[in-house]
Amino acid sequence: MWGSGKKKRGSSSGSGGPSSSSSSSAASASAAARTAMFSKYASADDPFSLDMDCLGSFFDDLGMDPTEDVRCLVLMWRMGAEAKPGEISQAEWGKGCEKLDVEDLEGFKKLLPSLDTGFLSGSDFSKFFKFCFQFSREGTHKTIEKDLVVALLQIVLEGRGNVHLVPFCSFLESTGDENNRVSLDSWLNFLTFSEDISEGCEEYDLDEGAWPVLIDEYVEWVRKKK
């Protein structure tokens, strides 16, 4: 896995030999440090991935609470933790560390200021928003429970001035079992809706049929609350 960081020795000329050897040694040392750091947090049951419990220990060492700090999700997104929900594989960890140029805890700590979602806008934030849903799924489930949706929205959209955040969360909390789970389509459409539609939903056309049923129900709820 880590072999790609090593350069093959040429058999012809010696141009750049010592420099090439030093570069190869540095890359090998960095790879070893990243592997050692991964192994520090991996469990004996699965030494090739970090699940939520393992990641919890990692985030604790970074001084972050994953239940409140959106930077935990931003970091996982930037590291490419996409293979399975709620975990990062050893391969993803290695590639992510190389991409972010980190190999130890101090390196990760220096990254923290850059993980603020305020640096994300437009398409980047939309991609991150989608990742948050996918990463928060359980096993093979394609939907997530509304209680988790509420918690996620409050973490991910905090400080972005989203006028629908509070009322939409209140709407979800007030609904019965019919909206007990939320799909990816509804999750993504809520972001678009919340950016395009005013707080009172005056311009929203219930007869148009362009939005998921969950959004229609939310608009009806908003209008009844007036």
Image (cartoon, rainbow, N blue to C red):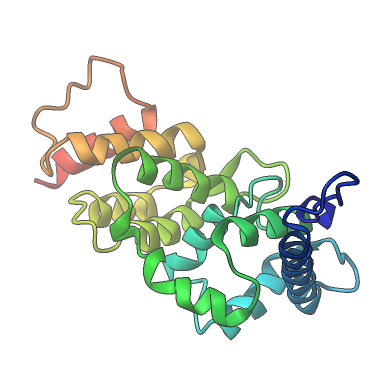
Q: Residue at x 30, y 16 (%)?
A: 209
Of residue 124 and residue 176, the one placed in the foreground of this image is 124
Q: Quadrant of residue 126?
A: top left
Q: Position of residue 101 (x, y in %)?
A: 57, 64
Q: Is residue 80 left or right of residue 160?
A: right
Q: Is residue 179 visible?
A: yes
| Quadrant (top left, top right, bottom left, bottom right) of the C terminus | top left
Q: Quadrant of residue 191?
A: top left
Of residue 11 and residue 79, the one placed in the foreground of this image is 11
Q: Looking at the picture, does residue 199 appear above or below residue 203?
A: below
Q: Looking at the picture, does residue 68 appear above or below residue 181?
A: below
Q: Position of residue 165 (x, y in %)?
A: 27, 53
Q: Is residue 57 left or right of residue 1?
A: left
| Residue at the extreme top of the image, as rendered | 208
Of residue 168 and residue 90, the one placed in the foreground of this image is 90
Q: Position of residue 74 (x, y in %)?
A: 47, 59
Q: Residue at x 74, y 68 (%)?
A: 22
Q: Residue at x 66, y 71 (%)?
A: 55
Q: Residue at x 24, y 53 (%)?
A: 167
Q: Is residue 68 visible?
A: no
Q: Position of residue 105 (x, y in %)?
A: 61, 80
The total number of labels drawn is 0
Q: Looking at the picture, does residue 41 appear above or below residue 143?
A: below
